[in-house]
Amino acid sequence: MKVKKLLHTRYRVDDLERTVKFYRDILGLEEIRRHKSPRGSELVFLKAPQSEETVEICSFPSSGSVQVQADLTHLAFSVDSLEEFGKHLAAHGLKYSDGPTMRATGGGFAFVDAPEGYEIELIEPAPQPAGAGGY
């Protein structure tokens, strides 16, 4: 038997509300569900407008402080324009932590740090020739 599809990814954080605010107000994700787990974790599920998969933000203070290592993990999101997203970040007092790095063939990528130190990769797809599909 095989798994069928990815449903969500969990990131544990110390400051739940600060992190949810970042994902909602900076990245534009929608909060779709919030509840407390049977073991006492506070859980918030968010999703990007064109995705089915969700990001689960979890606060579980009794497990200790979150220590995010450099280059441990990241989430990647598609954006129309890294230049425009950079302006959006600046309007909120933020900036890219790495990049943007543009490709000779078009498109590129950049990173911004979320609260707690998790990296968020933003990808501007290369333009597709007329009639071509895909990403």
Image (spheres, rainbow, N blue to C red):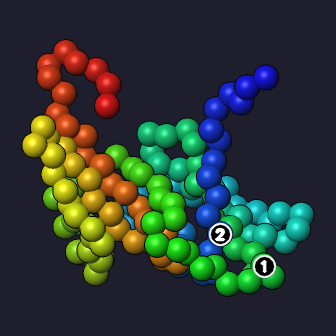
Query: Which of the image's four quarters has the C terminus?
Result: top left
Q: Nearer the viewer, residue 79 or 5?
A: 5
Amino acid type shown at disc 1: Ser
Amino acid type shown at disc 2: Arg
Label pair 1/2, CB-CB below 8 angstroms: yes
| Horizontal arrangement in the rendering, residue 44 relative to residue 135 (left or right) | right
| Horizontal arrangement in the rendering, residue 14 relative to residue 28 (left or right) | right
Give the quarter of the image for residue 41: bottom right
| Horizontal arrangement in the rendering, residue 134 relative to residue 84 (left or right) | right
Residue 23, image x and y in percent?
Answer: 47, 64
How far is disc 1 from disc 2 in space, using C-alphas?
10 Å
Residue 100, image x and y in percent?
Answer: 20, 60
Residue behind mark 2: 12
Q: How many neighbours does mark 2 have within 10 angstroms: few (below 14), some (14-19), or many (20 or more)?
A: many
Q: Nearer the viewer, residue 66 or 83?
A: 66
Label 1's element?
Answer: helix
Q: Is any part of residue 92 visible from this angle? A: yes
Residue 87, image x and y in percent?
Answer: 19, 67
Query: Which of the image's four quarters has the N terminus?
Result: top right
Residue behind mark 1: 63
